[in-house]
Image: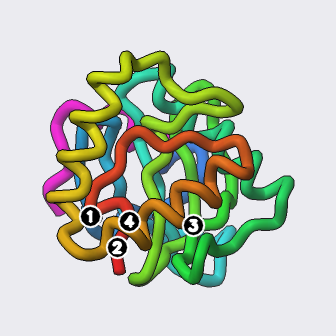
């Protein structure tokens, strides 16, 4: 398996610490990379996100802890990964693997208050997202409203993160 070079040391440290074996890359984005893994600690395969930046890691852990506290497993019929464990030193998050429909990738989310964007930026953001989701935008808005009700404000909204 070809591991992303910039994460090699982080992945190696994680595997040694958690007795895990990565199986394949699920995806790589602006916040980090996600691998599937196996470990004698878990009876099933799981996902591990390796974060590039501490701020995104902290946001994502905060969202997962909020979802865990509220016992949320899905939002408007879209599964959300369940937090298994996280490591503040390695900036890794273990979570369950979900299949569509799902909502995931909370590294760009904000807890309890939305990002401080100007009205123009919000207008442009909304126009872009309406195009990205085509006719599904009204359903996406309901999902985002449900997250906001929980105090989670998602800024990184795209068809890869909210899938139907």
- Vertically, is 9 above or below 106? above
SS assignment at label 4: strand
Neighbor class of circle 2 (other Cα within 10 Å; few <14, some 14-19, many 20+) is some
Q: Nearer the viewer, residue 79 or 164?
A: 164
Residue 155, image x and y in percent?
41, 39
**Tag 1 and tag 2, C-beta contact below 8 Å:** yes
Residue 52, image x and y in percent?
35, 28
Magenta residue span: 1-14
CA–CA distance between discs 1 and 4? 5 Å
**Tag 1 and tag 4, C-beta contact below 8 Å:** yes
CA–CA distance between discs 3 and 2? 13 Å
- Vertically, is 82 above or below 56? below
Identify the image quadrant of residue 163.
Answer: bottom left
- Please, what is the dominant secondary structure of the magenta stretch? helix
SS assignment at label 1: loop
* Residue at left offset 64%, top offset 27%: 113
**Tag 3 and tag 2, C-beta contact below 8 Å:** no
CA–CA distance between discs 3 and 1? 16 Å
SS assignment at label 3: loop
Neighbor class of circle 1 (other Cα within 10 Å; few <14, some 14-19, many 20+) is some
Q: Nearer the viewer, residue 162 or 38?
A: 162
SS assignment at label 2: strand
Disc 1 designates what residue? Answer: 159
CA–CA distance between discs 1 and 2? 5 Å
Dot 3 or dot 2: first in sequence order is 3
4 drawn magenta:
yes
Q: Nearer the viewer, residue 23 or 86?
A: 86
Disc 4 designates what residue? Answer: 162
Disc 2 designates what residue? Answer: 163
Quadrant location, the N terminus = bottom left
Disc 3 designates what residue? Answer: 81
């Amino acid at each position: 398996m070809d591991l992303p070079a910039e994460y090699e040391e982080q992945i190696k440290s994680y595997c040694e610490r958690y007795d895990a074996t990565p199986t394949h890359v699920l995806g790589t984005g602006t916040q980090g990379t996600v691998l599937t893994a196996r470990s004698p600690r878990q009876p099933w395969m799981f996902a591990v996100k390796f974060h590039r930046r501490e701020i995104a890691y902290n946001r994502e852990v905060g969202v997962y802890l909020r979802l865990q506290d509220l016992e949320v497993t899905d939002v408007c019929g879209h599964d959300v990964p369940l937090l298994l464990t996280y490591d503040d030193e390695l900036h890794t998050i273990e979570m369950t693997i979900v299949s569509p429909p799902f909502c995931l990738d909370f590294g760009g989310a904000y807890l309890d208050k939305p990002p401080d964007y100007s009205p123009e930026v919000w207008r442009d953001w909304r126009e872009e997202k309406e195009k990205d989701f085509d006719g599904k935008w009204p359903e996406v808005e309901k999902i985002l409203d449900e997250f906001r009700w929980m105090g989670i404000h998602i800024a990184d909204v795209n068809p890869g993160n909210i899938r139907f």
